[in-house]
Image: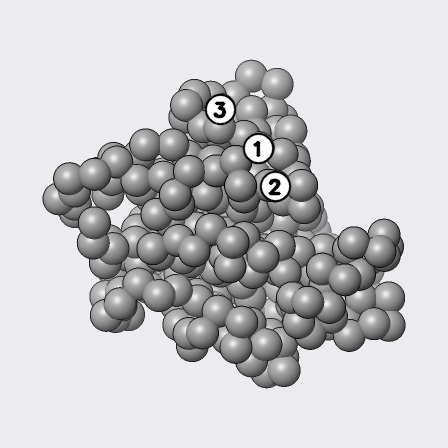
């Protein structure tokens, strides 16, 4: 779907990563005036600049002076989720035993040189810039979290979140919350995409181990095993069937956690190829293939990014 648009829009993308939002806007045909990106991870910046040379990187989100920016048409970002995630610390917006539940409290602590722990407190920088830039549209993405923190975000942004599972548009299960003032968004239609639909190289990094057969168990979507015998059943000790969805892409150690069943009876499994990992997120093939960026970094930034087709689905409702 290409949009009809008369004006060039200015975009401020916080926690921009490798510019997943810019991919979505590009594919939708939006005309970009200036695209300001706040990101500090060097490999992600390198990938973004390689694909979109006109990206204007403006450094750490905590240092952005909104007064130097032009009028912003779209503010978007996925603030760090580690402290919000049910699988993370669950500290949410509690920082060093201090409850940071309002922008005023955050600004007070920041101005007094308070030492913040974790990263999820950076949500308040999104709120700060949201209030300062007053964009026509905004989009904030984050993980499912405890209701107390979800309610704080909802109150600050003035809209209820929409929960969309990437499984509807991709071969990956990924439930995320999206806060936006873009109107009339519906759930995407289910495209019924499985791992087998995005396979690129079925011979990539195959492996086997006779000890897998001693402990393997079959579940609905994957095979799991416990070679250690200690009952860990870790994420890296499983492999997904081709006719199922891949798990939510992790940020760390993705190379060993995204396994696919090649031959169940003979205990042959393989790793996911980097292109397949990109496809789980509906990112263009080899978008992250850039000189000086390792495969480990490629997988990390993809796992830390957005599902492009979900973002496209949301942004296509914007009207300029």
Looking at the image, is 21 positioned above or below residue 317?
A: above
How many labels were placed on the picture?
3
Q: Which residue is mark 1?
A: 58
Which residue is rendered at x = 44% and y = 65% of the image? 178
For residue 184, what is the image quadrant?
Answer: bottom left
Please tell me whether mark 2 sits on a helix, a strand or a loop. loop
Along the polypeptide, which appears first: circle 2 or circle 3? 3
Residue 312 % position (x, y): 30, 51
C-alpha gap between disc 3 and disc 1: 13 Å
Marks 2 and 3, how far apart at CA: 19 Å
Label 2, on which residue? 64
**Quick one: SS at disc 3?**
helix
Asked whether disc 2 touches disc 1, contact meaning CB atoms under 8 Å apart, the reply is yes
Q: Earlier in the sequence, mark 2 or mark 1?
A: 1
Is disc 2 surrounded by few (<14), some (14 to 19) or many (20+) residues within 10 Å? Answer: some
Give the numbered dot on residue 49.
3
Asked if residue 105 can be seen in this view, the reply is yes
- Image coordinates of residue 13 in percent, x first then y, are 48, 44
Residue 300 in sight here:
no
Q: Which residue is at a point 20% across and 54% down the rendered structure image?
A: 319
Instruction: Write down the quadrant of residue 108 in the picture.
Output: bottom right
Towards the viewer: 36 or 307: 36
Q: Nearer the viewer, residue 158 or 91?
A: 158
Q: Residue at x 21, y 38 (%)?
A: 7
**Lateral position of residue 276 relative to residue 212, left or right:** left
Mark 3 crowdedness (10 Å alpha carbons): few <14, some 14-19, many ≥20: some
């Amino acid at each position: 779907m290409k949009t009809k648009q008369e004006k060039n829009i200015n975009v401020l993308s916080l926690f921009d990563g490798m510019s997943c939002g810019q991919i979505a806007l590009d594919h939708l045909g939006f005309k970009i005036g200036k695209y300001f990106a706040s990101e500090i991870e060097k490999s992600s910046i390198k990938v973004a600049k390689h694909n979109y040379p006109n990206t204007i990187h403006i450094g750490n989100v905590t240092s952005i002076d909104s007064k130097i920016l032009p009028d912003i048409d779209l503010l978007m970002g996925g603030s760090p989720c580690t402290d919000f995630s049910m699988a993370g610390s669950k500290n949410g917006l509690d920082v060093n035993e201090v409850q940071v539940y309002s922008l005023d409290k955050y600004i007070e602590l920041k101005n007094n040189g308070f030492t913040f722990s974790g990263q999820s407190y950076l949500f308040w920088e999104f709120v700060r810039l949201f209030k300062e830039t007053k964009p026509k549209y905004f989009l904030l993405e984050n993980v499912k979290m405890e209701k107390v923190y979800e309610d704080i975000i909802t109150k600050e942004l003035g809209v209820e979140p929409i929960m969309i599972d990437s499984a509807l548009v991709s071969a990956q299960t990924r439930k995320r919350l999206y806060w936006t003032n873009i109107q009339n968004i519906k759930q995407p239609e289910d495209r019924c995409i499985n791992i087998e639909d995005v396979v690129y190289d079925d011979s990539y990094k195959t492996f086997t181990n006779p000890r897998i057969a001693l402990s393997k168990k079959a579940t609905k979507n994957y095979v799991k095993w416990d070679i250690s015998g200690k009952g860990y059943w870790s994420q890296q000790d499983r492999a997904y069937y081709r006719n199922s969805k891949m798990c939510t892409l992790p940020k760390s150690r993705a190379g060993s956690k995204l396994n696919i069943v090649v031959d169940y009876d003979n205990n042959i499994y393989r790793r996911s190829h980097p292109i397949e990992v990109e496809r789980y997120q509906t990112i263009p093939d080899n978008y992250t293939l850039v000189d000086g960026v390792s495969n480990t970094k490629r997988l990390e930034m993809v796992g830390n990014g957005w599902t492009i087709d979900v973002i496209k689905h949301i942004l296509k409702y914007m009207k300029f």
